[in-house]
Image (cartoon, grey):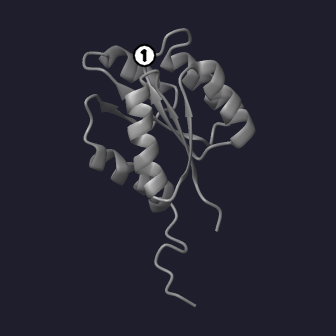
């Protein structure tokens, strides 16, 4: 079975490293980008299944990146990461197709469970398969 691909987009190195470790250990093929340009390059080349996208990124902001991701491939799932108080942007992100958001500092276990749910919960085929 192909490994699911998760792309982490955040300008904060510490957050990228943390999420990279968490999702690599969950068995995902993980990518990271510190800015929108690189993020969109990875989206085009790798077609990730899910993107964890920070709202506030210098240069191209999260909403702009989200629009581009959805233009490239509308089926890519996107979860936003926001700082406290960006509620107006959250509504816009949802309108643009983001699934949900986590407010920083987020609970890493909650995020892990949600990503697992998004990537495996949608289709139950194979999830409960017993060893052949």
Looking at the image, residue 10 sits to the left or right of residue 125; the answer is left
Q: Is mark 1 on a helix, strand or loop?
A: loop
Q: Which residue is drawn at 61% across and 27% down?
A: 39
User: Would residue 1 appear left or right of 18 to someone viewing this image?
Assistant: right
Classify 128 as above or below 14. Answer: below
Image coordinates of residue 70 in percent, x first then y, are 62, 30
Q: Is residue 110 above or below residue 87?
A: below
Question: Split into 4 quadrants, where in the image is the C terminus?
Answer: bottom right
| Residue at screen point 74% across, 37% down | 45
Residue drawn 51% across the image and 81% down it: 129
Residue most toward the right?
A: 45
Q: Tell me the quarter of the picture where residue 74 sits.
A: top right
Q: In which quarter of the image is residue 68?
A: top right
Front-most of residues 21 and 50: 21
Instruction: Looking at this view, name the residue that lies furthest to the top.
Output: 59
Q: Is the N terminus in the top left, top right, bottom left or bottom right quadrant?
A: bottom right
Give percent across and percent down for residue 94: 44, 28
Image position, residue 49 (x, y; %):
59, 47
**Residue located beneath label 1 in the image:** 56
Binning the other alpha carbons within 10 Å of mark 1 as few (below 14), some (14 to 19) or many (20 upward) gives some
Left or right side of 112 for 28: right
The residue drawn where x is 56% and y is 12% is 60
Q: How many marks?
A: 1
Is 76 in front, or is 97? 76
């Amino acid at each position: 079975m192909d490994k699911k691909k998760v792309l982490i987009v955040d300008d904060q190195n510490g957050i990228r490293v943390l999420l990279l470790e968490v999702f690599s250990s969950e068995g995902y093929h993980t990518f990271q980008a510190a800015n929108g340009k690189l993020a969109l390059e990875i989206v085009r080349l790798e077609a990730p299944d899910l993107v964890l996208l920070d709202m506030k990124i210098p240069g191209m902001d999260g909403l702009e990146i989200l629009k581009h991701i959805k233009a490239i491939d509308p089926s890519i799932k996107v979860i936003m990461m926001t700082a406290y108080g960006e509620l107006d942007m959250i509504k816009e992100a949802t309108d643009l197709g983001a699934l949900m958001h986590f407010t920083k500092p987020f609970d890493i276990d909650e995020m892990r469970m949600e990503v697992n749910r998004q990537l495996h919960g949608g289709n139950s085929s194979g999830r409960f398969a017993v060893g052949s």
